[in-house]
Image: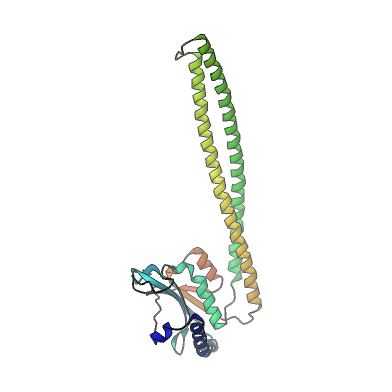
Amino acid sequence: MSRTLSGLSWDEARQIVQVLEQIGQPYIDAELELLRSQRKRSRYDGDLTGIPVSNSSQTYPNTAFGHMDDEIRLGYQAVVVSLTSPTYGRLWLAVAHHPGDTVSCTQAEALVLAAEARTGLHPRRRTELLRGRIQACEEQMAQTGKRLETQKGAVQCAQDRLAEAEQQKQERQQQFDELDRAYQARQRKERPSGRLAQARQRLQASAKRLRSREKARQEAQRRLDKTTIRCREQQAELTLLTQRLTRFEQDNAANPEPVEAEFRLDAGFGTYTRTSLCSSKWATKPTPNLTPRFGPN
């Protein structure tokens, strides 16, 4: 079997996968119909599980070092999603292989989409949650916009003060140069309390003030640049959320009889953005220590 599979081309392997999915699909459809007739939620489990290979192997493509069984190993991360089945206990819906350094929090949406693609069903999109996120994003953007305008004013003020300090330094440099030439022409020595010494002190103070104001201008510009980047990020996020809301509304309009579903993920999938995304699609529930097992259930 191993030699036969290793001799397959990618097209042949995909054909085998397609045939196996066709064979398994009636079982999945039957279990989903059974759950619906029993008025039960469809329950899905998603996780990553490591598939290590030899750390010195060079024959496996697209491997990478990552956490597997509490060790750093070379291999793959299998992204798996399954359906809790009244008849069989568990039915596998989808498996996708990724390099071993893939982390869970990047795969939550892919698991949800894989479950929907295999079952052909999805629950009502929770557009009210998404609208709440859009409203919160708009409020944050308004606050960021006010801060942006304030910081623009601060940068302009810092630039004006810097220009004033530059002008003052030029004037005092000119005064010092004139006095210095006059002293040299008369062959006079500079005394600590003389006019030339005082002019030198004023010039040094102007140079110090110029450096201080340049530093203040750079700091004001740094804050403005940071806020500008944040404003662009928020605008991009708002655009993404708005597009998603449109797509979700279309999904709901085309789904008059949505199923009730629960998608269980462990804590490794948890980031604010990913959790909010899944919550806007599914009723999500954390399941600690959920580790998929291969083989008969």
Residue for point 53% across, 45% down: 222
- The colour scheme used here is rainbow
Residue 235, percent from left and from top: 61, 57
Residue 4, percent from left and from top: 42, 86
- Determine whether, in the image, residue 200 is placed left or right of residue 131: left
Asked where in the image residue 122 lies, by quadrant, the reply is bottom right
Q: Is residue 83 above or below residue 165?
A: below
- Quarter the C terminus occupies: bottom left
Q: Is residue 223 visible?
A: yes
Asked where in the image residue 64 lies, by quadrant, the reply is bottom left
Q: Is residue 287 visible?
A: no
Residue for point 46% across, 67% down: 105
Residue 212, percent from left and from top: 51, 33
- Quarter the N terminus occupies: bottom left
Q: How many marks?
A: 0
Q: Is residue 207 above or below residue 60?
A: above
Residue 215, percent from left and from top: 51, 37
Q: Is residue 289 above or below residue 153?
A: below
Residue for point 57% across, 46% down: 224
Q: Nearer the viewer, residue 186 or 115?
A: 186
Q: Nearer the viewer, residue 229 or 281?
A: 229
Q: Nearer the viewer, residue 29 or 106?
A: 106
